[in-house]
Image: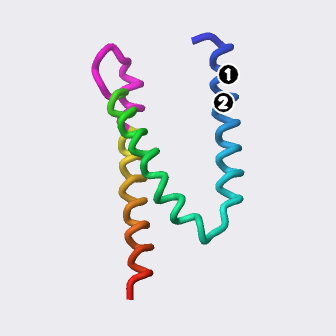
């Protein structure tokens, strides 16, 4: 990987982090939980990508470990999102 592509990837990471923080900071608290529960589909896509990265078809050991870490973190995110959604829905029941 050349230094130019590394700089571009770093730039995209910083820009995406900044935009994500700004977008989440602007969401009112009443909408935060429904929006976060809706983002479970995105974490599901991350799980699929992590499974592909854990595959043994020519990937390096580092990418396999990074894929495994991504798989664990995305799974925690999905389970936590569903738990929060379930808790939120129970608040509306009498």
The residue under the point 29% across, 25% down is 55
- Residue that numbered label 1 is attached to: 8
- Residue that numbered label 2 is attached to: 12
Instruction: Tell me the element at label 1.
Output: helix
Quadrant of residue 71 within the rendered picture: top left
Q: Residues within 10 Å of mark 2 (few under 14, many from 20)?
A: few
Q: Start and end of the magenta stretch?
A: 54-68
Residue 46 left/right relative to 16: left
Instruction: Tell me the element at label 2.
Output: helix
Q: Residues within 10 Å of mark 1 (few under 14, many from 20)?
A: few
Residue 81 left/right relative to 58: right
Please tell me whether residue 18 is drawn above or below residue 83 in the rendered image. above
Mark 2 touches mark 1? (CB < 8 Å): yes
The residue under the point 43% across, 52% down is 40
Position of the N terminus, as image quadrant, is top right
Furthest residue in direction left, as rendered: 56
């Amino acid at each position: 990987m050349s230094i130019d592509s590394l700089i571009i990837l770093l730039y995209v990471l910083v820009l995406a982090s900044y935009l994500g923080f700004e977008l989440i900071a602007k969401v009112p608290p009443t909408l935060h939980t429904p929006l976060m529960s809706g983002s479970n589909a995105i974490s599901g896509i991350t799980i699929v990508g992590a499974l592909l990265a854990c595959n043994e078809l020519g990937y390096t050991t580092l990418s396999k470990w990074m894929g495994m870490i991504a798989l664990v973190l995305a799974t925690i995110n999905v389970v936590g999102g569903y738990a929060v959604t379930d808790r939120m829905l129970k608040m509306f029941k009498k």
